[in-house]
Image (cartoon, grey):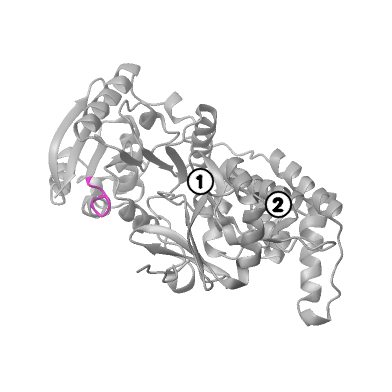
Amino acid sequence: MTNNSRHASSYRDPSGHIFVDNGIVKRVIFPSYFSQYDALKSSEFFQKAFQHKLLIPHEEIEKSETHIYIQPEQIPFFTYPYEWSFQQYKEAALHTLKLQKYALQHNFSLKDATAYNIAFHNGSAIFIDTLSLDFYTENTPWRAYKQFITHFLGPLVIAKYHGAEFLKTMSNFIDGIPLKLIASLLPGKTKLNPFLYTNIHLLAKYENKHQEEDVQERKQASLSKKGLFNIIDSLYNYIKKLQLKEQSEWGNYYQKTNYSEAAFQQKSSIINDWIAEIKVKTVIDVGGNDGTFVRQISSDIELALVGDIDNNAVDHNHYLVKKNKETNMIPFVIDLLNPSAAIGFQNTERSSFVERVQKLKPDVTLALALIHHLSLTGNVPFENSAAFFASFSENLIIEFPKRADSYATRLLNAKAEFKHQFGHYNVENFENTYSEHFQLIDKKEIPDSERVLFLFKKK
């Protein structure tokens, strides 16, 4: 018997919800959505949207008078909007607009345009909420227009002016950044921009003016389909041109690394040998910069999650994924000193980073050139970082920069008069502490460097 208990993230739409049945994500559709579903199916909209990679493919597995069950293509790992780089966020926004335009061309329309309806899968953004498609009603505005502004345009424009760090605040605004806040954070000169004035400032002013009114008393606006297409095209063209101006310390990390090309190649060779020994199929690199070392792996990797704190590094990784047509890599933004928490109602709508990785159970975790930042920048004791990695790592490949390493030395010197309090930062203490959680399988000095690679297996 199918267990169709509603998933914690899927309570907002009364026409159906997702559920997990024996580890497989499925969706139940209720009679209130049957007419839309049947029209989308019979018109072959679904099939064409699947072919154009606009909508996650699904199969109908059961149909009765009370429900329809569909099984979407399974997505092994979800990243959320506050874990996307600027270019990923742009792609998600543009993909939503592409689907809306395609839907309008076939007399349908998106009733929802939340950023959480997008996932990154097989190297690209994909729309995952089948039930967000509804009938288009002639001469009516886009129902999800304001939601698109608060979930996509607003965050992207603020990031343009204030930096990509702002995108992380989406974790505080699961229903989108409030219009009033968006308008208040933009420079005054943006009011002189006709596009931004119309789509943000005027919209915020209108909302503020009419928020006390009874919805029933409002005059319903009228907008032709041509007008809708014009709005979608203007949003698409503006967002497509958006760029960041900020630079970062780690965006070109591998062009200014502190060890030689020979050391780099040796490091890559050691990692490759260990990966082959433990027959890795899934890997997470939690400080992976632009994915350089994961791309050096010669084994056949089915899924590689590559996270980094630096937006520009993740942007470049995303660019390489697109350029190389890679379908097995998911770049994402992560601050290991403050990884994404569980959010939403009852803190269950969106799982924490650790919960998601624990569920995935990757074969190996890579933590390269990272421990000195956790220990010396974040002051995280070895016992704490070891427990953190042990919470989701079956195998751990971790690089330890010795005190004589130039980067580690710089961080130690930054402690000034407190430097002496970090005498515990040494290879022996590191190995002994991590051995409380892991079994040491192998360790190798990286030639021509002050770094050591460790291969641990969880006890």
- Label 1 packing within 10 angstroms: few (<14), some (14-19), many (20+): many
Q: Which mark is residue 103?
A: 2
Q: Alpha-carbon distance for marks 2 and 1?
A: 21 Å
SS state under label 2: helix
Q: Is residue 322 magenta?
A: no
> In the image, what residue type sits under mark 1?
Phe
Image quarter for residue 407? Answer: top left
Residue range (magenta): 389-394
Q: Position of residue 86 (x, y in %)?
A: 58, 44
Seen in the image, is 153 located left or right of residue 415?
Answer: right
Residue at 46% over, 62% down: 350
> In the image, what residue type sits under mark 2?
Ala
- Label 2 packing within 10 angstroms: few (<14), some (14-19), many (20+): many
Q: Height in image: 269 above or below 241?
A: above
Are dots 2 and 1 in contact, CB under 8 Å?
Answer: no
Residue at 45% over, 52% down: 78
Seen in the image, is 73 located left or right of residue 51?
Answer: left
Residue at 56% over, 43% down: 88
Q: Residue furthest top?
A: 262
Image quarter for residue 140? Answer: bottom right
Residue 337 visible in the snapshot: yes
Query: 250 or 420, which is in the foreground?
Result: 250
Q: Disc 2 or 1, which lies upstream in sequence?
A: 2
Tell me the mark number nearer the camera, choosing from 2 and 1.
Answer: 2
Query: 412 or 65, which is in the foreground?
Result: 65
Q: Height in image: 436 above or below 265?
A: below
Residue 184 visible in the snapshot: no
SS state under label 1: strand
What residue is pinned by disc 1? Answer: 120
